[in-house]
Amino acid sequence: MTPSATAVELKSCPLYINGKAVISTGPKDIQHNPATGEAVAEIPRCTPEEISAAIDAAHKAFPAWSKTPVVQRCKVLFKFRELLEANAQELVGLITEENGKTRDEAQGSFDRGIECIEFACGAPTLMMGDTVDRVGTSVDSWSTRYPVGVCVGITPFNFPIMVPLWMFPLAIACGNTFILKPSDKVPRTAARMVELAQQAGMPPGVLNLVHGAKSTVDQLLTDPRVRAVSFVGSSAVAKYIYETSANNGKRVQALGGAKNHSVVMPDADMKSTVAAVMGSGFGCAGERCLATSVVVAVGEIGDPLVKELVRAADNLTVGDGCDVKTGMGPVITDESKKRILSYIELGEKEGAMLARDGRKDAVANGKGYFVGPTILDKVNPESRVAKEEIFGPVLSVIRVKDLKEAIEVVSQSEYGNAASIFTRSGGAARQFTQNVTAGMVGINVGVPAPVAFFPFSGWKSSFFGDLHALGKDGVNFYTETKVVTCRWPD
Ligand code: NAD
């Protein structure tokens, strides 16, 4: 994003410090609508003073918020949920404008975000400790949970509302205060969401919002007042966040990138499998951390499967996500588009067969950052397109002879976010589930995203840390346990 001369006409994006909207005095970048390429807003990079003020606000708000009864904390979140629902259409529209995904996809991610608030509202139960009477003569023992302190959330561009909602509602319900640093590519949805949180009665300083990229993040990771860091983004940055946070004495959960596989067995139901693989591979323009990127076709299903996938891809309407007819929107930036196109070129060089070339679609050659759905067939499992995260609408098909070979292909991946199998055989599904090295497994499901009460449990280079986001892991991450050992004579 580079500043342009038209900046004066653009929308602005506030930060929130101590409950107040602030216009940053830092330098600005220009945000473009990915469907049109037009400049839409000015995105600030916060100054060090602004970031320090946000940390200070969260630090000062912590003692009172952590002692506010948990049911009262949850009441604010109930109200916040109500305000989000009341403003759903506006927020869904903002997601589409910033990110490019279709309105249906934006609505789906909004709904999943709401579920995270609902989960967080269970904090009175989730925070319960354990008790054992008579661990010794006249001695009882129990554990209680305490909030950690100031927590930071750093989020990616692909889910402007859902991923922040993985983090701060649970952190805040558990009694922590929070600083959100959304993606510098899609910060306006987050700003509107934080505004609604203030309207819901979030006390000043409990939820703060700052903007920027590396230097903003570095200041948050090194400030001693910050106790915990939640990150979602690419693996290279996740590893950096994990190491830097840990070196600075903070607890950290860093969710990274992915290269997800869908294994299709010869007995799979063709119609529902093709629909699921299409939704997973090309939904959100392939920009999902659970998107299928590699289809592993087992035995004789290869030819008919590729034929059906190509047919379905030919029928996919690619265009502006605002249009109700659109089935797939643009990718996020011109830079992303160029990277994805270079991977298609690389796939050809590496010997793959181009079963469908999305570069030739008319929409890919007009305004906006569009890449048509692309299918590379007979991909070598050792090639770079088979191994590296492309994060765009490109499916690589690898042909294998049996399930054992399919599991080997999946398990040799550096990443371990998701893997799915499509089959009518319970035995094959069981063998797959038990042997595959991925943390989220789908059986006849293309995007095996756990609901909020389970952890989002990536493995290998898809996750750095010990406790995942959401579920019981999330509660453990945002709380510290105190164990009391008490002696009173009988
Ligand atoms: P990214 O890593 O470029 O950015 C993520 C966040 O880190 C942003 O807020 C960004 O401003 C910040 N950032 C970027 N570079 C940084 C640096 N050098 N130092 C410190 N901070 C930096 O990721 P993205 O392009 O926004 O999102 C796409 C990636 O996120 C994909 O790899 C995708 O697989 C991954 N992702 C993973 C999950 C998951 O649950 N594992 C979920 C969604 C997205």
Image (spheres, rainbow, N blue to C red):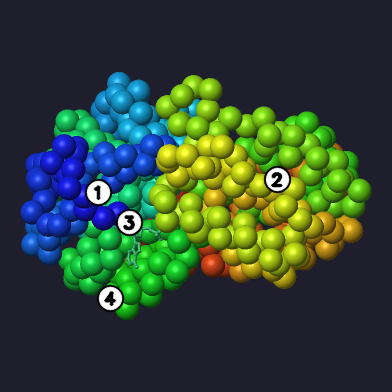
Task: Find disc 1 in the rendering and name its residue.
Answer: 30
Q: Distance between the residues labelled 2 and 1?
A: 34 Å
Q: How far apart are marks 3 and 1 (CA)?
A: 20 Å
- Which residue is rendered at x = 86% and y = 46% of the image? 303
Q: What residue type is labelled 1?
A: Ile
Q: In which quarter of the image is the N terminus?
A: bottom left
**Quick check: is the Cβ at mark 3 less than 8 Å away from ligand 1?**
yes
Task: Find disc 4 in the rendering and name its residue.
Answer: 248
- Give the number of the disc on residue 285: none
SS class, disc 4: loop
Q: Which amino acid does label 2 sit on?
A: Arg
- Which residue is rendered at x = 59% and y = 47% of the image? 359
Task: Find disc 3 in the rendering and name its residue.
Answer: 154
The quarter of the rendering in which ligand 1 is drawn is: bottom left
Q: How far apart are marks 2 and 4 (CA)?
A: 48 Å
Q: Where is residue 307 in the image (x, y as percent from the top left)?
A: 80, 40
In this orientation, which residue lies closer to the viewer: 285 or 251?
Answer: 285
Q: Is residue 57 shown to the viewer in this render?
A: no
Task: Find disc 2 in the rendering and name its residue.
Answer: 356
In this orientation, which residue lies closer to the viewer: 310 or 45?
Answer: 310
The disc, 4 or 3, on the residue closer to the chain's N-terminal end is: 3
